[in-house]
Amino acid sequence: AAMDAGLLLPSSSPSVIFTQDDLKKIAAYKAVEYVESGMVLGLGTGSTAKHAVDRIGELLRQGKLKDIVGIPTSKKTHEQALSLGIPLSDLDSHPVVDLAIDGADEVDPFLNLVKGRGGSLLREKMVESACKKFIVIVDESKLVNYLGGSRLAMPVEVIQFCWRFTAERLRKLFEEAGCVAKLRTFGEKEEPFVTDNGNFIVDLYFERSIGDLKAASDAILQLAGVVEHGMFLDMATTVIVAGELGLTVKNK
Ligand code: 5RP
């Protein structure tokens, strides 16, 4: 690998070490190049999307973008956009969104995603399914061979009522994949994490591939008590990946 890197980077060039946050910012700024004046924009949630929202605010302030309407995907992004002076609306008033920019937790080779480790999957999925174009911004650590393959959580938003019952039914669905289902908590007291919509999150962890994603999605959504899950199948139109060796733009 060192030899390969040597071929790509002339030995005279100073080596630049990017932090993961630098890479997130590079991907976010690239995505904002696709934003045009007059657009209705879906504003994503998380540490990567935050950079995109900051950049949109900056371009508005500089007068380089005009007549933007932002549709936030979480209370947190709503607050951020408000503080930047981005005019805001919602899907009731703007049922068609021109472009959404958001991060993801996992991206597979077909541009299917896992989202929601930040807990905003439901509003994100509502806004991003109303989009003409959906640009996903990630650093290269988010790329996986198959969804669930990072051994990190695949989130499912469930109603609070009898969440243990729902969690057990979720685990059973994926027993063959070695599924473990855990209630998401926060803080030392391990209090349940409550979403912007007043629900809980059950995080699913898999030992093996869950196989057919569409079948998995349908089975999860069939369970009464489930509100939404974090698999975003066939939704992203573009994925921008920032890595140590540069930017890659993948189109559907
Ligand atoms: C929140 C999300 C985020 O987009 C996802 O978790 C990525 O976050 P980050 O950019 O902080 O890694 O889906 O619900």
Image (cartoon, grey):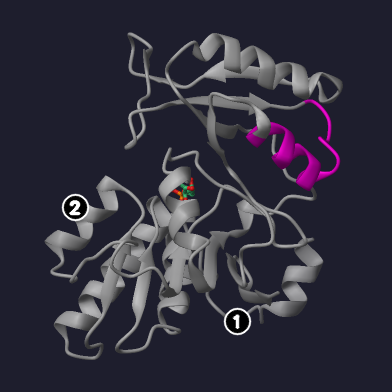
Relative to 112, 192 lies left or right: left
Tell which circle, 1 or 2, labels the residue nearer the N-terminal end: 1
Q: Which residue is mark 2?
A: 79
Q: Amino acid at mark 2?
A: Glu
Relative to 147, 31 lies left or right: left
Magenta part of the chain: 207-221
Residue located 67% across and 78% down the image: 9
Q: Which mark is residue 12?
A: 1
Task: State the quadrant of the N terminus.
Answer: bottom right
Query: Is 8 above or below relative to 163?
Result: below
Q: Secondary structure at mark 2?
A: helix
Given this view, does label 1 or label 2 mark the residue nearer the observer?
A: 2
Q: Amino acid at mark 1?
A: Ser
Residue 139 is situated, as x and y percent measured from the top left of the image, at: 56, 59
Residue located 65% across and 78% down the image: 11
Residue 176 is situated, as x and y percent measured from the top left of the image, at: 86, 22
Residue 133 is situated, as x and y percent measured from the top left of the image, at: 53, 75
Tell me where residue 88 sits by quadrant: bottom left
**Of the pair 12 and 38, the residue shown nearer to us:** 38
**Of the pair 238 and 220, the residue shown nearer to us:** 220
Relative to 44, 214 lies left or right: right
Magenta span: predominant SS is helix
